[in-house]
Amino acid sequence: MKLTRLTALVLALVMALSMLTVAQSEEKPSTWISDELVEIRIMRDENPSQPITTDNIKLQAIEELLNVRIIVEAPPKASYADKKSVLIATDDMPDIMFVSHSDVQTYARDGMFVNLSEYKDQMPNLFAVLAANPSTATLTIDGSYYAAPGIQRINPDARRSGQLVNIRVDLLEKYNIPTPTTWDELYEAILTIQKNEPGLVGMTNRKGGSTTATRKMMDCMAYPLGSSSSMYYDEDLGGVWVYGPAHENFKAVLTYLNKCYAAGVLDPDYAVMTKDLWTEKFSSGNAICTIDNDGVVRNFNVALQTVDPNAEIAVIPTLTNTLGQTRNFYADENKLGEAWVISASSEHIDVCVKFLDWCYSQQGADVNGYGKEGVTFDYVDGKPVIKADLLAQYAANGSTASYDIQSALGIGLLDISPYFDTGAQNQMEIYMMGSAEAIAEYRALVASIYADTNLRAPVQNPPLTAEQTERINELSLAVENIIWQEVDKYITGQEPIENYDKVIEAARKAGAEEMEKIYNEAWAALLGK
Amino acid sequence: MAIKEGGVSRKAFNIFNYVFLFLLMVVCLYPLYLQFIISISHGLEVMKGGITLLPRNVTLATYRAILRGDLFMYMKNSIIYTVVGTAVNLFMSCLCAYPLSRRTFSGRRFFTAMVSVTLFFGGGMIPMYLTVKQFDLMDTMWALILPGAISTYNMIIIRTAFQSIPDSLVESAQLDGATDLTILWKIVIPLSKATLATMLLFYAVSHWNSYFDAMLYINKKELYPLQIMLRNMLIGGQLAEETEMVGSSAASFATTDATLRAGTIIVSTLPILIVYPFVQRHFVKGVMVGSIKG
């Protein structure tokens, strides 16, 4: 067939246009951080509540967006410390590793981790988030950031929690007791309830993760009662760092707890409590009050209400202590104790730097918190919202639903999410509440905790030099040995409270005073910057 | 135990014996039974506590939740490591024990002494890790099998059992033209079955229970043994004390951490419980054979 000139011209044009289109489609997407597909190994611990999946939709989304394939290694939380130590000791770290801030303090100076401050110009997102969270300045080592900390991007459904005073409000109502506003009123309220309902445990607690039950109780109660169980920043003492148990104010804590113990208001088993026993006491309606994580305690209502439909355990506003202070901390919304480091021996430092920075971008937080746009979430009024069919699918899993959905999608705080957003978990929880009334009640409760102005932001420890860190480790061991073998004696009344002065003196001599000096100097150095 | 007629004191002793052993049995079995009844009770009832003898509000929700997870993948891995590992252990231990048991083997004392040194001194965790890495065994099942292919203690017990076989038997086989391998395979091993069955149990239980090597040398979840997951559930759960979920309804508490823990313990204990009775009868005999002669 003979082609006319015109036909040939049209065909040539069509061919040229189609080639142009192909060329355009082959142009790399603007979001890519590497021209070639790069594999980077990232390791973090696996929380048993949320198994980490190594082939999920989030990882696919990251590969498409960044041209980076993430190889996830997730040793179990129970063995993570050992694994981490071996990898650091053998210099066989993955490209990016999840460590604790104390690891950063220990190893950064040895050159194990990349100094992120040297890459500041390549990490605009990370450094913008750090600047927006001034308390992260406490994480620097000799003025530099060696790790990207866990920072929360607050979403509209986020809840604030803390070691708050939780009490059976139905029993207060039943015996016409006004909501306590002071710790002494709380004592009287529990005593009144116990007189009417003998056999109920007054104030109880649980064993901590890796600490004793007494220590955990002190971690929760010492600050609101006027002191602290360890080194802390006390605004009421004029803004100084104080080693709580070696300070005069700690006697106020012990005096109050001793009064409770003597009257039977404090659980006689407080020193040997476990998490399971604590759960049992509240779920079966046998306990009145606990100072602990309000989110965990609120769950007891479900079991409690099968025993008594009117029963309810709820948070009350911050109480005034015997020193006249009305104070408590809310739990830090960030995870500054958690750190993401890049191995100095990584072959892909540049890609890791870009990837870590991307995690702190809005897109990074959306992907790490909600998965893949259009597949697992959509934007509603500009905010990411998990698709309803996914929520319905995982709701069937019951009490593990919020962790199951995050596990399957590879998202959330317990996965690879340095700049984390708890939105998916919050949306799952709210979805499972069902009725509008329950959701409204929940939102009111969350709002009341945000509204409690006596709940203060926790203050992070100041950054210490290598010598200071070593000295603090040395001293704290000696001081803690003195303190924690004595505390129970004063709570149970085996020793009169006056004798605690001797413990304070011994602890200060053993190093508490020097520890305070080191912290205050480090704090002054930080503020001076 | 045969009860002879007559003798009040003997009867009293037997009654005491049966009662005591029955109580001992209860003490041993009750923890397992408790985990079982917790695993089939409703989570809310477990939260309230007080489950001691019978399950309450029976549900299989826990087992349904366990089946949704990767438990069977981990269990399959554990079974592979146990079967292959134990086979390698027995094979290598016999190969090492046989020459050391023969008096005709020159240098026997020297090699026995060298092997015995490892009972008291080890290379340590870091050198072992580097060795495994240099042999390219990381993330393979061989990392869990080859470094511990021979347990010196078990090998010495096998050697002692092999030594109890008379030299004359070995010599007569040699006169008939049998090679060392034939003698080992056709005479020595068949005569040491009881000891080998015991060693099989020792090795198998050790493989089934081990988690530390897997934690060090395995990074891929699909290669993890069951014990890694179990340990994480039991210990990691305590470490992660602040994980919680709020605002759930009563129905959603059919399974809780406690019921899942109990169910996992039951499912993971089953294989060893099933195998144990078949090997147990060799157990005492095998240890005695290996220990009193030497």
Image: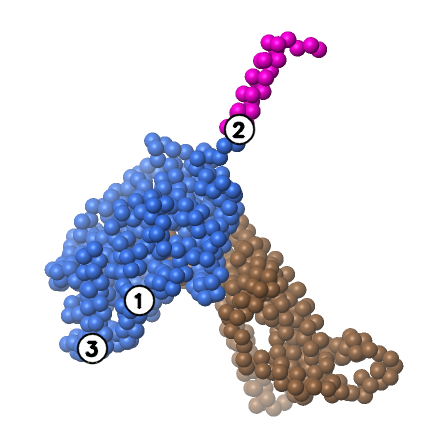
In the rendered image, residue A9 lying in the magenta stretch gets the answer yes
Q: Which residues are magenta?
A: A1-24
Disc 3: which residue: A509
Task: Residue under label 1, please give it.
Answer: A466
Q: Secondary structure at mark 3?
A: helix
Q: Which residue carries the number 2 mark? A: A23
- Vertical position of residue B40 compared to residue A465: above or below: above
Looking at the picture, tell me which residue is in the foreground, B49 or A328: A328
Q: Please, what is the dominant secondary structure of the magenta stretch? A: helix
Q: Most extreme residue toward the front, as rendered? A: A5
Q: Which circle, 3 or 1, is nearer the viewer?
A: 1
Mark 1 closeness class: few <14, some 14–19, many ≥20 residues within 10 Å:
some
Q: Quadrant of residue B291?
A: bottom right
Residue at image point 21% right, 72% down:
A514
The residue type indicated by label 1 comes to Ala
Q: CA distance from mark 2 to mark 1?
A: 55 Å
Q: Which chain is blue?
A: A
Mark in the foreground, 3 or 2: 2
> Where residue A513 sits in the image (x, y, percent)?
19, 72
Measure the C-alpha gap from mark 3 to mark 1.
23 Å
**Left or right of A6 on screen, residue B181:** right
Image position, residue A284 (x, y; %): 35, 58
Q: Chain of mark 3?
A: A
x 20%, y 68%: residue: A516
